[in-house]
Amino acid sequence: MAMPNLEAPLLFFFFFVFLLALTPSRAQTFGPPLVSPIQKDPSTLQYIITAYLRSPEEPTKLFLDLGGSYFWINCDDYNSSTYRHIPCTTLLDEFVGCFACLMNCRDSNPNCGDSVCVLKPENPFDPTSSENNNQYAPALVDYFSMLTLDNTGSIGGLSSSSPFTFIFSCGYKENLRGLAGGVTGSAGLGRSKISIPVQASTIFHYPRYFALCLSGSKTRPGAAFIGTEGPYKFGRGIDLSKSLVYTPLLLNPVGKYSYPDLKKPSDEYFIGVSSIKVNGKVVALNRSLLAIDSGNGSGGTKLSTVVPFTQLATSIYKAVTEAFVKAAASSPFNLTAAKPAQPFSVCYPARNVKTTRDGPTVPAIELVMHRNDVVWKILGSNSMVRVAMTGGHDVWCLGFVDAGVKPKTSIFAGDPSIVIGGYQMEDNFLQFDLESMRLGFSSSVLSRGTNCASFKFAAKRG
């Protein structure tokens, strides 16, 4: 494939982007909001969305990385008639924040170019990621689309973007190690200038909102929405935008690409948990761990689709599990712990645990936010995990894990004290308002008589 003339269309795109960004009028929306099913892979517990890339358009499965800076795709198998590289030392190169410049690669394919911008295809599941820490790949600009919502909340057709309007990074086949089968890259929804929701907002002039409803079903998908603040209509016509309470999204000033003399803010999403309650009682813990350290970025509470179950710093984990065991042993629960099942340390025989539509009947865990009346309540459907044991016995286990001693986020950036994982977000509706920098959350929607698998993805018939 002969490489096209790059400079003119890309510079035009750069100025087009900024003209849009500088024009705040909502009346000039270019298209309907975007939507995608979110499927959970049963073997890896990863969450997967579908986008449409290249020309002609092809469905592409991407790992949903909530805190990812941008999206990347395996370009070893990338065929498109419309892709463009980003030339080094251009305004677009500066805007993207490229890591380096690839030189003297003369083959005519997306993973090669001469004097082109490169990014970093990051895969948190790759067991050899530390070996590939300095692996870079060219940045591309190409067509991008997703399913859309019409003004009734029904599924429409694919969105249509202008040529060369979405920026993403290439990757290589080896970057796919550890990802679910059929997945060819990663969809970053983080705070950066080139994450999917931010680019969509700039190009299509959407409001800067996106929302996630991860499904707790083993077979039916949840839903991701980009570019709309609602309504979000699920089963029985329930609009989940009506059930949200809000807490600020906090900026961690020290991200993974920081250095001692240059701090770069994190693109991940943090919230301010001020205390934790179990069965209505405040858990005694070192509250300094709940704040983000401005020096090294450690501490605080991060939201993540990378970890399957919520991780707690060791001292917090010990305090919470001890409080949970004590509360579960008391009336009305009267539960006696059983042999633990890895990776969990607190389990109970399933036959002894009563269940309701809110899941197993166990002590509630409450994350108290910036005010005492703003509480993320975690009921049994999100706190307990069913585990089949050998010999035909099965147990319900508290689905929180000890973060233990693990490598820091980077050489210079510390780890969060709490990482809220995917399981605890399932059947909870989360709206990320990037205009006011706040998180809207519902706690479990099961108590409202619906679930995240009840959004209808069948297209409306004309």
Image (spheres, helix red, strand yellow):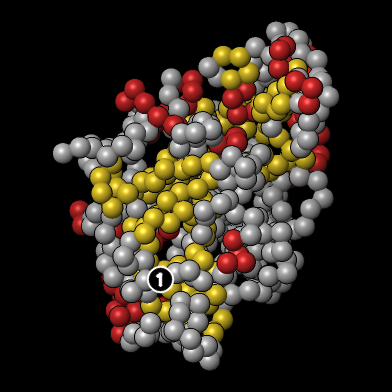
Against 148, residue 109 (above or below) is below
The residue lying furthest to the top in this view is 332
Instruction: Name the quadrant containing residue 242.
Output: top left
The residue lying furthest to the left in this view is 462
Q: Which residue in the structure is indicated by mark 1?
A: 79
**Image location of residue 139, percent across then percent down:** 47, 74
User: Residue at point 57% right, 31% down?
Assistant: 376
Relative side of 270 to 235, left or right: right
Against 70, residue 373 (above or below) is above
Instruction: Name the quadrant containing residue 128.
Output: bottom right
Disc 1 residue type (three-letter): Asn
Against 111, residue 165 (above or below) is above
Relative side of 206 to 405, left or right: left
Could you say whether the residue bearing mark 1 is in a helix, strand or loop? loop
Relative side of 81 to 60, left or right: left
**Image location of residue 24, percent across then percent down:** 28, 59
- Figure quadrant of the C terminus: top left
Relative side of 202 to 249, left or right: left
**Image location of residue 420, percent across then percent down:** 62, 41
Whether residue 323 is visible: no
User: Residue at point 28% right, 63% down?
Assistant: 161
- Figure quadrant of the N terminus: bottom left
